[in-house]
């Protein structure tokens, strides 16, 4: 979700669904500095998966 209005709509619909269904929903939030939101961390994660944990010996 790109902007706060779409997040707000999502939360509103989620609350309405929970009330109609008579269920409790607990939301878990990632802190803003979490690696999930850091594009560089995501690149490194993809690279680590690509090299399967091998150690990079040279940059050539």
Image (tube, rainbow, N blue to C red):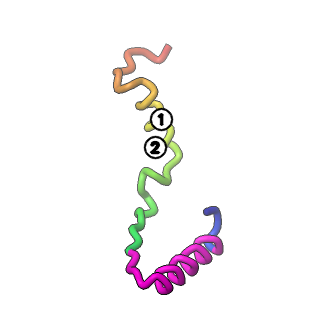
Splitting the image into 4 quarters, where does residue 27 fall? bottom left
Which label number is shown at residue 46? 1
- Counting residues from the start of the chain, the first of labels 2 and 1 encountered is 2
The answer to if 32 sits in the magenta stretch is: no
Residue at image location 47% in from the left, 35% down from the top: 46
Observer-nearest of 57 and 53 = 53
User: Going by the image, does 43 lie left or right of 31?
Assistant: right
36 versus 51 height, above or below = below
Q: State which region is magenta.
A: 5-25
| Numbered label tally | 2
Local packing at callout 1 (Cα closer than 10 Å; few below 14, some 14-19, many 20+) is few
Q: Could you tell me which quadrant the N terminus lies in? A: bottom right
Which label number is shown at residue 8? none
47 versus 37 height, above or below = above
Element class at badge 1: helix
State how far apart marks 2 and 1 are (Cα): 9 Å
Element class at badge 2: helix
Location of mark 2 (residue): 41
Residue at image location 59% in from the left, 77% down from the top: 8
Residue at image location 34% in from the left, 26% down from the top: 53
Q: Position of residue 43 (x, y in %)?
A: 50, 38
Observer-nearest of 60 and 3 = 3
Local packing at callout 2 (Cα closer than 10 Å; few below 14, some 14-19, many 20+) is few
Q: Is there CB contact under 8 Å for labels 2 and 1?
A: no
Q: Position of residue 36 (x, y in %)?
A: 45, 52
The answer to if 24 sits in the magenta stretch is: yes
């Amino acid at each position: 979700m790109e902007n706060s209005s779409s997040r707000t709509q999502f939360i509103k619909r989620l609350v309405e669904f929970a009330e109609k269904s008579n269920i409790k929903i607990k939301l878990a939030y990632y802190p803003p500095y979490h690696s999930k939101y850091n594009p560089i961390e995501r690149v490194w994660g993809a690279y680590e998966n690509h090299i399967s944990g091998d150690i990079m010996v040279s940059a050539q």
